[in-house]
Structure formats: structure tokens, C-alpha cells
Image (cartoon, rainbow, N blue to C red):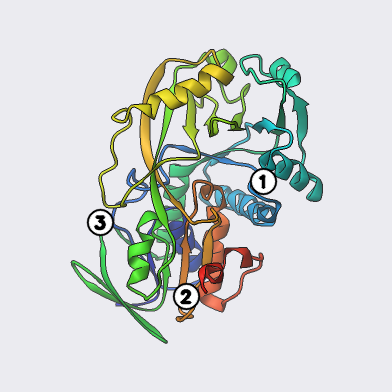
Amino acid sequence: MNYDVIIIGAGSMGMAAGYYLSKSGKRTLLLDSFNPPHNKGSHHGDTRIIRYAYGEGEEYVPFILKAHELWNDLEKASGKQLFTQTGVLNVGKEESAFIQNIISSAKSYSLPLDVMDASAVHDRWSSITLPDDFIGCFEPTSGVLKSEEIIKAYRELAELNSATILTNSRVKDISIRDDSVTIKTDEQTYYSDKLVITAGAWSGDLLSMVDLDLPLTAVRKTFAWFDANETFYNHNNFPAFAFDTVQGTYYGFPSIEGSGLKVGRHDGGNPIRPDDSLVDFGEMAEDEGDLARFLTQYIPNISQLKYGKTCMYTHTPDDKFIIDLHPKYSNVAIAAGFSGHGFKFSSAVGQALSNLIISGKNDVDISQFSINRFRD
């Protein structure tokens, strides 16, 4: 059967794109090597932070505000509660780029933000201990997205819109012409007018099939849940958080439905090939130790590990996303390199991919995510 659009990779960005394309009436096929949501890539682990006063750069704010709007739409369309407003506490030295970006973006876009010194942070959340030269920036309207539930919601809605989703289907070959695409898997050959490639850590190998070499690096990441006193750490009393420290950048979540306090490290990680088996949490010496040292210094009442997991980040050299049309083939759209902070944007990325592949345009400026920045 011929399709209007084939999407390779039905994870965070691909499943969202499949929803928007099928909603627009396009005959859409999604192919994935696994069965989303799954634990082989970057979207598992139950939760993701969403914040609007953005420490990675003020230029992200219009895109995240669009994503926020679309998350509200998804909740209405699916009838599911997918966002929990815990607020997010961002912590670091006042002069750090991360903290300064948060403060400046809040001012530029009139976003609510409470800026507190270390003592005020401790007064509000007594279990947090900060150095005297740290400050906290609390964003009360931000919070937590249910990542796996979101994948399920997009999948269900896309299928209601007659999208076809084929799981455990690995792509072996891609052939592109100006007005057609041929995709081969082990089982079948599929045809379409247009193609979207959004396959996370596997994007590099797929892009090589369409004559595109982009600087993408996959790394192994870890995160874990720790036993926590529900009186202090439940999601009604304790925020999600991001800490920019000398030792590294850490993030975490309050205990949601008794899950325990979740903590991960954002920076660092060991480079891997995406087809390599991820080494289980705890099999590398620093998996627990690194997180435990962070907790001992900043949230010292937390110590007992419940369990941990591993996932993958896919980095670009500048840690910015890639969302663009193929420089040679205008019927191919690409999204890759979401660098550990992409999930919160995935609703807007999915819509952007749908817009790009249909019209070549998007209603939010995404020029900063162009492929051209990597080309001579």
C-alpha cells in the first residue's frame, strides 16, 4: 500500500508526528524497531520535567510555550491526566549561565518565578541544604509530564485517525526520489510520498541511508528512585528540581503515587552504539554512588536506593535539537539530537514535523534547529 507519509521511529517525537499527520488526514505509517512505549530508547522512566523559564537558553521559550499549549490539547483529546503541576526548583550559583538564563527568560516572557537565597530555599523545603552562594528559582506553574502515558495517548489517537503503526519492524533500506520514498524492512516494502526520520539514537544509521552524515552521539544514562518520607517528598509538598553544581548537573522528581524520590544526572555519560545492550543499572561502579553523593550533599535525608534504570541520550555538539528538512530532499523531514532535554518539547516537535512535511513551514520559528549549522 502507498502512504502519504512514513515515519521511521515511533517514540516521543515520531508518535506525536504520527498523531498530527493522521489528524490532518494524511495516510500515515509509523515503523518502529520495538513496541512503543518501551525501555530501549529515551522515553521510559515514567516522568519528565517541563519548565518554561529555560536554563538552556531564552530562545527555547516560544517553542516550550507552544508545547505547553499542545499538552493541554492532548489531555483534552485523550481524556487523560498527563501533567502534574508540582512546580520546578532550579538551583545553582547566581552567576551561572543556567540560572541567568532562567531569570532573563522569565522577565522577557513574563513567566512567574520566585527567586530565593539558600536560606529561603531551606525555609520552604527543610530537607534541601544549599551552599550559601547558591540561589533557587522556583517556577510554580511548571511540573511533571507522564512520558509513557503520553506515548500511549498519542498512539491511541493516531490509530483512531487511521494511522498504521507497525512495531518490531526494523528498517533495512531507504530509497528517495524527488516525489517518492521506498522503505524496506525484513518483512515488507513500503511506499510513500514523504518521509519523517525521528529514531533517537538510531537516527545516524538511518540518515546515512539518505546521504546525510550528522554529528550525533549516543550515551548511556542512569536514573534511580530512592525511599522517601511521603510527608515531605510527595508531589503536593515537594517540587521537581534541577541542580547546576560544580560536581555536575542533576535533576529529580518528588514521590508520585508513592514511587519514591527520582534522581538522575544530566551531564556526562559513556558513549555507546545504540544496538549495544545497555548495561543494567548498578553494574557500573558509579551508577548509584554518583547519585548518592549528590543526595548526601543537597538532600541528605534521602539515602536508601529502591531501584534504578538506564536509558540513552543522543547529543549534538552544541546540545541543540535538529528539526529540519533534508538539505537535498524536500520530502524528507528529520528530528534528532534531543540531548536529554527534548521530551518536554515533543508535542511541539511532532506538530512541527507535520507542518514541515506538509507545507515546508512551521508557525513557531525553529531556524535555530537547522541542519545547516553542521554543514561547511
Q: Residues within 10 Å of mark 1 (few under 14, many from 20)?
A: many
Image coords of residue 187 (percent x, y): 18, 67
Tell me which corner region of the image, top left, top right, bottom left or bottom right, holds residue 39.
top left
Q: In the visual, does 169 lie left or right of 320? A: left
Q: Amino acid at mark 3?
A: Asn
Q: Nearer the viewer, residue 174 or 249?
A: 249
Tags 1 and 2 in contact by the CB under 8 Å rule?
no
Question: How many numbered circles are shown?
Answer: 3
Q: Amino acid at mark 1?
A: Tyr
Q: In the visual, does 105 lie left or right of 196? A: right
Q: Residue at x 55, y 63 (%)?
A: 351
Image coords of residue 267 (percent x, y): 50, 40
The residue where tag 3 is placed is 168
Decide which of tag 3 and tag 1 comes sooner along the chain: 1
Question: Relative to 224, does residue 172 appear above or below in the rendering?
Answer: below
Q: Nearer the viewer, mark 3 or mark 2?
A: 2
Which quarter shows the N terminus?
bottom left
- Most extreme residue toward the left is 187
The residue where tag 1 is placed is 54
Q: In the visual, does 164 lie left or right of 241? A: left
Q: Amino acid at mark 2?
A: His
Q: Residues within 10 Å of mark 3 (few under 14, many from 20)?
A: few
Q: Residue at x 27, y 52 (%)?
A: 275
Tags 3 and 1 in contact by the CB under 8 Å rule?
no
The residue where tag 2 is placed is 326
Decide which of tag 1 and tag 2 comes sooner along the chain: 1
